[in-house]
Image: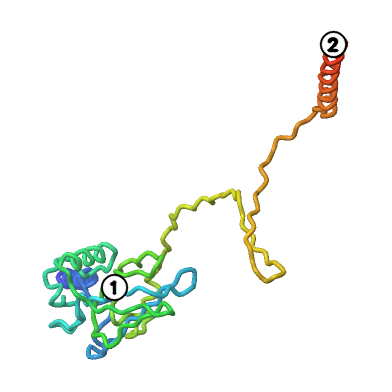
Amino acid sequence: MKNRTATIIKIVALVLLICCVFSTNVTMVHALTYQDVDIDETGSISITIKYDDNPVAGGSVTLYQVASMQLDENGDLQFVLTQDYESFDGDLTTLDESLTSSLETYTELNELVGLTQNINDSGYTCFNDLTLGLYLVIQGDAADGYMPISTFLVTVPEETSGTVIYDVDASPKTSVAKIADCTPIAEEETTTVTETTQETTTPAGTSSKVKKETPTPTIPQTGLLVWPVVLLIIVGVLLVGLGFMLVFLDKDKESK
């Protein structure tokens, strides 16, 4: 009886151990299994760039396939690095910002060439006929007046609410910001016009240019009376005349 109980306990412990091992080491791609995914299917990645719900036209984005999606010897889905990324030593199990940054650095250092497409007037572009796998999206050429979108990873296919999506909309992964306008405001120039030229037409039909001078402003004078000055001048002239008359009269008397 004791042996049977010990055997049952060992079996239960072994089952629990196996469950723990599988729960911590399963590396299925986003919980997808080969029963869910048609490995020979192709997909697409569409991107729409907006700012305040308005499309941002211009610029381009480049797509790099980091890994393909394949079945391992156990029939599970796994990522296999492409030839361009075969020297990358990062872990593809967790698709986080750290992995994205490492892949972006690797891509730039190795000057890898991807598939580049322009953003149309609706802020939209789409990469079609893609084999299943892991892709890196980088925007090197942003629209005028805007910052580039952040680099991100996307898988084809994706699972949404238990449904396998081969045509992936990557728009929710993209956000764009405007470049701050640091242009200094030009100071208004003030000019003083001192002379203008006006063209007039004479009755004979000929035209002549007449210069119009802008009057020079003068300081108004207050409290100065003009008539006393005029009166003094007149009195002075009369006195001088009277003096000459007296001189002539004296000479006339002497001569007689």
**Residue 117 falls left or right of residue 51:** left
Question: Residue 80 at x, y = what percent?
Answer: 16, 77
Residue drawn at (19%, 80%), measured in percent from left and top? Answer: 68
The percent position of residue 202, horizontal first and vertical second, equals 70, 66
Q: Residue 137: which disc?
A: 1
Let me know if residue 8 appears in the view. Answer: no
- Give the residue type at disc 2: Ser
- 245 and 161: which is toward the camera: 245
Residue at image point 69% right, 70% down: 204
Residue type at mark 1? Val
Identity of the residue drawn at 22% across and 68% down: 24
User: Which corner quadrant of the image does residue 87 belong to?
Assistant: bottom left
Q: Residues within 10 Å of mark 1 (few under 14, many from 20)?
A: many
Q: Does the residue at mark 2 contact the one at mark 1 (Cβ under 8 Å)?
A: no
Q: Is residue 85 visible?
A: yes
Numbered circle sitting on residue 91? none
The C terminus, quarter of image:
top right
Res 255 label: 2
Q: Earlier in the sequence, mark 2 or mark 1?
A: 1
